[in-house]
Image (tube, rainbow, N blue to C red):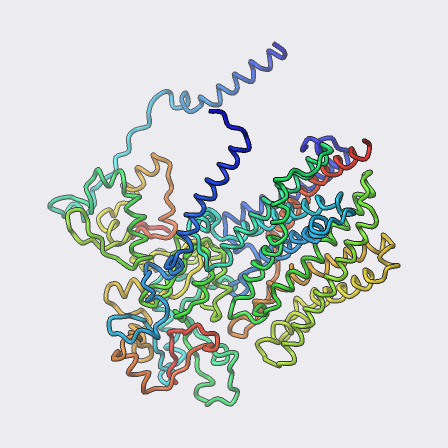
Amino acid sequence: MSIDRRKFLKMAGLTALGLSGTGAYELLKPGALEASHGHDAHGSGHGSEAAEDKNRTRWAMLIDMTRCEAADVEKASHACHHAHNVPDMENPKHAIKWLWGETYEGTFPDSHNEYQAHELEHKTFPLMCNHCDKPPCVRVCPTQATFRRPDGIVAMDYHRCIGCRFCMAACPYGSRSFNFVDPRTALKFEDLNKKFPTRYPGAVEKCNFCVERLADGLQPACVEAVPHVFTFGNLADPDSNVRKILRERTSLRRKLELGTKPSVFYLV
Amino acid sequence: MIEKALNASNRFWGWIIFLLAIIGVGFLCYLHQLNTGLGITGMSRDVSWGVYIAQFTYFVGVAAGAVMLVIPKYLHHYTKYAKVVVFGEFIAIAAVIMCLLFIIVDIGQPNKMMNVVLFPTPNSMLFYDMIVLNGYLLINVIVGWNTLLADKKGLPCPGWVKPFIYLSIPWAVSIHTVTAFLYAGLPGRHLWLTAVMAPRFLASAFAAGPSLLILLLLFVRKVSKFDAGLDAIQNIARTVCYAMIVNLFFLFMEFFTAYYSNIPGHIHPLEYMFFGLHGHDALVPFLRTSVLTGFISVFILLVPAFRRNLKLLALGCFLVFLSTWLEKGVGLVIGGFIPNPFEGITEYQITFPEFAIALAIWAVGALILSILYKVAITVREEEQIV
Amino acid sequence: MYDAGKVYLGLAIFIGIFTFGFYYSHGTAAPQPKPSIDTPEINKMAKKQCVEDTEFMRSSHMKLLVEWRDEALRNGNRTFVNSRGEKIKISLQNTCLKCHSNKKDFCDRCHTYAMTAPYCWDCHIDPNGGKL
């Protein structure tokens, strides 16, 4: 059977359309877009207003600023950075910070009350990733290297990260750090936590709410280091420790007007 | 047709070798960057995008400029542009390749680049950017090459190319809109969180792309026998003028919203860029020059007597290119990161390897443009002889 | 034939370059790698078995590790049930390298022979390695 060029091109075009059609369907069908929220297509990754449910988990961190001093922030930061082999880079431009201290003004920049209570105004606030319920970083990541787990933790998959740093631009809290150089140049083998890997140049990293410790039934490193300041618990369970505290204490969250719904609460 | 680029004067070859030398140096610096990491650039935890992404952002605009010729010629049959459109499309090809190269050198783990294709993420604007940039490159290669080939053979443009031509019009708008969406949807960066981000991108694109085209066409008039026609050039210049006016207008809109609302978060990035903030003023000379050259260029291009004077026209177009480059290629991206989310200021300073790599990519663009233009000029010259 | 001398010379150089691999190793094969399982943890075991049987691990440990990393990191599931029904904790550093603590004499032997350099070790630490 001989076929002329025109007929061939028509057939080839229709085939290509058909193939890409199924591909497009897979991509855009209902439920496929939830893929960026991790392995959960049930929709429970979408924020927790719907779920006042003991069986759901949304991890949250409470930080009691009335009992937090600068030395506590140092201690927590050291515990976190040691547990996760976070290097102390010489060049401040290449700094990698999972948990660090910031002034009151720096923590709440756009709502800075210059007539604030004296005690609060001079505190050092411990800052970390807020593990937002509606994280902008997850929205922008082109490879789903950062994704929101069903338990509320915004996780990083370093294997998939291409280092485009879009998430760093998107994060309104400055929680993310990039490995500009090999982090191992600033780490000594003897000081490492051998149970946890390092990262490599070209990947973005941040606080991970100690997922690896949670898997072993342990509390996050900062909570273990400074228990009188840090409290960790399940926000979705109305009877949990954190919910009880939040009902009684005044709390602040950073940049609430941006709609990110952060999970880190500062008790004042 | 590419063989037409091989028959050239010594001056042309000298230019090519010069470009190759720059590319060689930049390539070596890139190998150093692959070895050591992006720490060899001036980027930091606070200013996490720098020269590479800024150049990418600017050249997406230059690439979209071709549409300012395609619309009049193909939708409105403005025949004066008939000989000129392909030169705009070739600028688009060179510019898009530069954009793709700038993205590649900026990625921290380039060996993982295919992850963007392997794991499609419809909620991420970078995913769409990858699609629209590559698509625009493909469209321009198909259209530019085939229309030129048809001209060489003395035939009308083949029918199957027409859909691609019409597609290139909304597609040009899309490359810009998607790139603007990278910035305009980020909640934490006040400089970028504005509805006019995409319109600003389009306005500066429609000024920058055609102004580069005019400069190149005037240069081509001098060094070859091809004359694009003064009517065509004047019309393009008028387009550039109006686009630049709109561009400056949009900038004024930004100032009004920030300063009249008096919201500190909105004011601070603009203040840093144009006046300096808390003693930090590294970008101020660049941004002020951008505004000044912008106004001067509009003045030159608006007054017909100045615009008809080819030397002044060249100056005006150069100032448009410079003004838009300073605003997008230096100001916008870096300025968006300052102040940082804690209201602190970490300034940005380019390093030599970073400069060498960026310059090498400019040279790659110039190389592609030179070769493609040589082909196009030769075809046009041969047409005139017949 | 025009330029016969140049053609023959070019052919000779081409053949010389492309058969380099054969005559450089004098026609012998490189010795087969022998990964060593002589480690304290393995010596303690009554029945020396890995999470799966040797044949499977030899052919598919890379696939298993990729499945493990996606299960643990992306799906949050750090327990692997192997073909024998045993529950294994998913961890390269803490499970695999707990028994195979001699990375240089085990993992590296075959990897060096096959000229692969898996980038796992850019991040994952060999707990018994003295360097990074």
Relative to A177, is B356 on the left or the right? right
In the displayed image of the protein, which residue is found farthest to the top? C1
Image x and y of residue B54, in percent? 61, 58
> Which is more toward the observer, B100 or A224?
B100
Q: Where in the figure is residue B236, as x and y percent of width and height?
A: 77, 53
User: x, y percentage for residue A42?
Assistant: 31, 63
Q: Is residue A151 above or below residue B378?
A: below
Looking at the image, residue A40 sits to the left or right of residue B69; the answer is left
**Which residue occupies 35% across, 67% down?**
A80
Residue C128 in the image: state x and y as whole percent.
Answer: 28, 50
Residue nearest the viewer, comparing A257 with B73: B73
Q: Residue at x 72, y 40 (%)?
A: B373
Depth check: give the residue in front, B170 or C73: B170
Left or right of B186, for residue A77: left
Residue toward you, B106 or B371: B371
**Residue B263 as seen in the image, left or right of residue B84:** left
Can I make out residue A185 in this image? no
Decide if residue A245 is in sight here. Answer: yes
Q: Quadrant of residue B286?
A: bottom right
State whether residue B197 is above or below residue A240.
Answer: above
Work out which quarter of the rendered image holds the N terminus of chain C and state it: top right
Q: Residue at the spot x=29%, y=62% of the render?
A: A212
| Number of marks present in the image shown | 0
Q: Is residue C103 above or below residue B123?
A: above
